[in-house]
Image: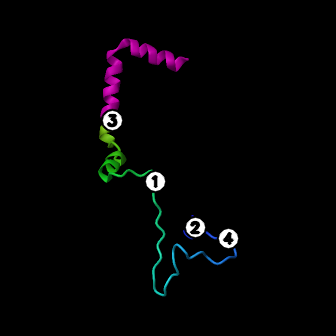
Amino acid sequence: MDANPHTAGEEPDDDVFGPVEDGEEVFEWIDDLEAEDDPALAQAQAQSPSLRERLAALRAAADRVRADRRRIGAVAASLVL
């Protein structure tokens, strides 16, 4: 992305940005339009469950499947098909 677009070979258009003075630092800001406005919400969404939490969820799912014989039959049928 060019912060000061102009046709190749032409002088940059300084109407908006103005000339750069000696010793002046120029920064180009890149806005992430898809970023969340609330940093706490973005951080909460970025955190993934730990290995311990994932294993606990897997064990709970296995317990539910073992408890229900119909689900075992459905899982077996889906694996065979």
**Tag 2 residue:** 2
Q: Which amino acid lies under the numbered mark 1 shown in the image of this protein?
A: Leu
Q: Quadrant of residue 73?
A: top left
Q: How many other residues sit within 10 Å of disc 4, few (<14), some (14-19) or many (≥20)?
A: few
Distance in Å between CA atoms under marks 1 and 2: 17 Å
Q: Are marks 4 and 2 in contact (CB under 8 Å)?
A: no
> 49 above or below 80?
below
Residue 33, given in percent of the width and then of the height, sits at: 46, 53
* SS for dot 3: helix
Front tag of 4 and 3: 4
Colouring convention used in this rendered image of the protein = rainbow
**Tag 4 residue:** 7
Q: Are marks 2 and 3 in contact (CB under 8 Å)?
A: no
Q: Which mark is residue 55?
A: 3
Of residues 4 and 62, which is closer to you in this image? 4
Q: Which mark is residue 22?
A: none
- Chief SS of the magenta region: helix
